[in-house]
Amino acid sequence: MVFKCQEDSFLKKFGSIVKSCKPAEVLIDGKTNKCFEVVLEDTIIFPEGGGQPSDIGYIDQRKVLKMVRKGADAVHFIDEPMEEGKNVSLEIDWDIRFDHMQQHSAQHLISAKLQQMYKFPTTSWSLNKDDTMVEFDITSIPKIDLNTLMLQLELAVNEKIKNNEPVKVKLFEPGDPGLEKAVTRGLPADHTGPIRVVAMVGDENMCCGTHVDTLGQLQMIKIVSIAPVKKKVQLRFVAGDRVLKDFNVRLARERNLSKLLQNGANDHETVVFNLLKSSKTLEKNLKDCSLEVAALMAEDVKRQDPPPKFVCVHRKEDAVGFARVFLSGVGADIVKLLTWGDEKGAGQMIFEGPEEVVKELGSKICEILGGKGAARGTRFQGAVSMLKNKDKAIQLLNEHFELVQK
Ligand SMILES: [Zn+2]
């Protein structure tokens, strides 16, 4: 079955007749919806297939919830029953459909040029919300420079667009020798009827999708990234109207960056490079200061006479280095509770002291601070989620050392 949308991909409105309608259930966004399964004599609402998503479409202005192809039928899931034999009018969201046509035809063009220029077969593709991905096998030239490939390929496909070369759809009966030239990744198991072949730039591909008539309708293809993934390569591109949208998003980002950096776009790289360099220096200085503070604070504890029963210290910044210097500096006989992180939220704790105290109080303190951890000899360490309860932990230590009444 060749649906009307495949016969004339530019049809935006169409009249058809209800062939059958029966109650059904359909899963949308993980939710089961009770609805009706409507089959029409023909349809312009494309049911998902060949990597192209379904259209957004309407029957008598009622939105079609989901479209699927079952054998020779396109099944429309709709929330109201429709009388068999009724004449209905169909409409599609043309902006979405044309976007799908541009991305899908662009994918065929990219795959064709990858094969013709480098003998790289396409192994999969996907049409996504922001871009379209083409995955290909580079076994024939494994050491190819991907940036050079990207530039060469981009020039080649845009040259074909500039020349406005035609896109033809041919129909073949199964077994027709004309099909031998066509590239295929296999037909669906329930396929019936003639086989469609989409031909452009000397490439023929079995495909059920809707396509543009001429490559000029693609306007432009821009490859936005190319990267090896496992043993293959994935490139991402935008075509047609998406090129302008993508360009505008990038320009807005650039303008925002210019405001933040208080500099023109041409200087962004230099400014960011210098900022990163100075932030590394600052980070190192901060670490050095933190270690000096840890040593001074430990000295201060050691100087106290009589020595305190316990000390509690909280640091906002990451305190791994601080902990090493402070805890060893204070001495093993004094109980120490060191915490760091968001004062009202999550962070880390180390509780250190004589083994019997750590064993008795470590897990209790950790629990108060909303965490889990384990005692190891003279140290209890753990991740915590409620540093706002620090005062309660200090209260427990005060009670333990009988500094206050329980
Ligand atoms: Zn296709």
Image (cartoon, helix red, strand yellow):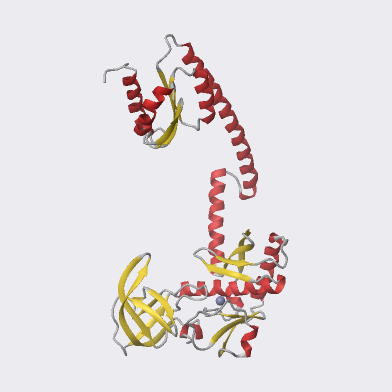
Q: Position of residue 363 (x, y in %)?
A: 38, 31
Quadrant for ligand 1?
bottom right
Which x, y percent locates residue 134?
59, 67
**Quadrant in the picture for residue 240:** bottom right
Residue drawn where x is 54% and y is 23% of the image = 325
Residue at 50 percent across and 23 percent down: it is: 327
Asked if residue 195 is positioned above or below residue 220 in the image, the reply reads below
Q: Is residue 150 visible?
A: yes
In the figure, is residue 295 to the left or right of 62?
A: right
Which quadrant is home to the C terminus? top left
Q: Is residue 73 left or right of residue 24?
A: right
Of residues 271 and 185, which is closer to you in this image?
185
Residue 317: x, y in percent?
49, 32
Counting from the top left corner in percent of width and height, residue 113 is at 67, 73
**Does residue 36 lie above or below 340 as drawn?**
below
Look at 46% across and 15% down and name the residue there.
Answer: 301
Quarter holding residue 137: bottom right
Q: Nearer the viewer, residue 31 or 44?
A: 31
**Res 341 visible:** no
Residue extending furthest top? 305
The number of numbered badges drawn on the structure is 0
- Above or below: residue 214 compared with residue 356: below
Q: Residue furthest left?
A: 406
For the residue pair 82 and 405, the one nearer the viewer reads as 405
